[in-house]
Image: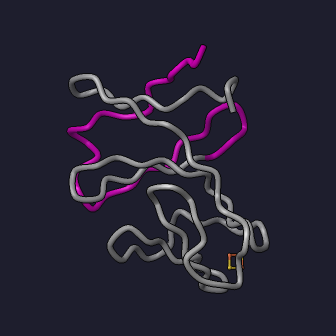
Amino acid sequence: MSEFVKVANLSELTPGTRKMVELDEVTVAIFNVNGQVYCIEDICTHDGGPLADGDIDGYSIACPRHGALFDLRDGQVLSMPAVVPVPTYRVKIEGDDIFVESPDDW
Ligand code: FES
């Protein structure tokens, strides 16, 4: 059974903003894109660089190192040089609280 961990308040994570959170030694990034919240791991699958500071265009995020593009909604690769999707994690919102699937379930 999945366990969710509170990571932020929706009132803080306004549309267009992001937040990095460390959970059990895994750094994840939470994004609010047009009012929808998504969570990905903060590691590019191309060469292990941090991903979450990359530029966002619509639902895509560009790796700051070599420019691979990933879809924030499902982690799929949109552009080389990465070829492996980035892990994404389920998000649950209850009132003002944002929860992410627990690392124990990852
Ligand atoms: S480390 Fe992300 S594209 Fe190379």
The answer to whether 48 appears left or right of 97 in the picture is right
The N terminus lies in which quarter of the figure?
A: top right
The answer to whether 95 appears left or right of 26 in the picture is left
Q: Position of residue 81 (x, y in %)?
A: 71, 84
Q: Quadrant of residue 105?
A: top right
Up the image or down, 22 lies above or below 1; here it is: below
Q: Position of residue 87 (x, y in %)?
A: 64, 51
Rendered residue at 56%/59% (across/down): 75
User: Which stretch is magenta?
Assistant: 1-27
Q: Position of residue 2 (x, y in %)?
A: 57, 19
The answer to whether 15 appears left or right of 69 in the picture is left
Q: How many discs appear?
A: 0
Whether residue 42 appears in magenta in the rendering, the answer is: no
Rendered residue at 69%/41% (across/down): 26
Residue found at the far right of this picture: 47
Along the line of sight, the residue nearer the viewer: 65 or 83: 83
**Which quadrant does ligand 1 occupy?**
bottom right
Q: Position of residue 7 (x, y in %)?
A: 44, 32
Rendered residue at 38%/67% (across/down): 59
Up the image or down, 55 lies above or below 40; here it is: below
The type of colouring in the image is one colour
Whether residue 3 appears in magenta in the rendering, the answer is: yes
Along the line of sight, the residue nearer the viewer: 79 or 23: 79
Q: Quadrant of residue 66?
A: bottom right
Rendered residue at 22%/51% (across/down): 35
Up the image or down, 102 lies above or below 81; here it is: above
